[in-house]
Amino acid sequence: MIHITTDPFPDDAAMARLWQASWGDAGPLSFQPILQRSLGHVGAYDGKTLIGFVNVAWDGGIHAFILDTCVDKAYQRRGLAIRLVRQAASLAKARGAHWLHVDFEPRLEPFYRKCGFRPTTAGLMRLA
């Protein structure tokens, strides 16, 4: 049975397994510093296995940011990512954010529109 939980603080092994299953690489060496600085995060579990994740970063004020939306490929196309993002939005609002931002590749625009985001103009500068 799949359940969604707020601030689950998964260990690095669980996050690396999910990252590999979602993105094809292991991701950061440790996710713990990221989780500790977040406004919050949301995880989806099938039993005890982490199968989905969304991080909510913030500026310390009223702006929050969706990062690292991922779902294990075996669980994709079931609406789970939309549920995760919507739960993350509710969490951000409950914790005082007034605005929720997300950046994404053009191919993901239909997904984020389904989640409730509307298009805006933004800028991006590559630093590395």
Image: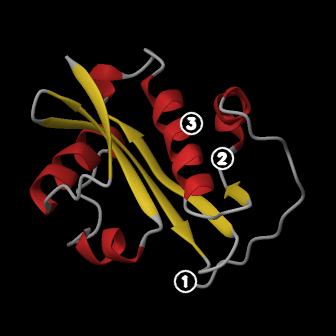
- Does 17 sit above or below residue 28? above
Image location (x, y in percent) of residue 17? 16, 46
In the rendered view, does 126 fall on the left or right side of 27?
right
Q: Earlier in the sequence, mark 1 or mark 2?
A: 2
In which quadrant of the rendered image does the C terminus lie?
bottom right
Image location (x, y in percent) of residue 95? 55, 62
Crowdedness near tag 1: few (<14), some (14–19) or many (≥20) residues, C-alpha within 10 Å: few
Tell me which corner region of the image, top left, top right, bottom left or bottom right, holds residue 107: top right
Q: Earlier in the sequence, mark 3 or mark 2?
A: 3
Kind of residue at disc 3:
Arg
Kindly identify the residue that appears in the image at 64 percent across and 36 percent down: 108
- Image disc number at residue 86: 3
In which quadrant of the rendered image does the N terminus lie?
top left
- Image disc number at residue 105: 2
Q: Secondary structure at mark 1?
A: loop
Count of labels shown? 3
Front-lying residue, 20 or 86: 86
Image location (x, y in percent) of residue 96? 63, 64
In the rendered view, does 96 fall on the left or right side of 25?
right
Kind of residue at disc 2:
Glu
Of tags 3 and 2, the one toward the viewer is 3
Kindly identify the residue that appears in the image at 74 percent across and 61 percent down: 98
Q: Earlier in the sequence, mark 3 or mark 1?
A: 3
Front-lying residue, 35 or 19: 35
- Does 111 sit above or below residue 70? above
Q: CA distance from mark 3 to mark 1?
A: 31 Å
Image location (x, y in percent) of residue 30? 21, 72
Crowdedness near tag 3: few (<14), some (14–19) or many (≥20) residues, C-alpha within 10 Å: some
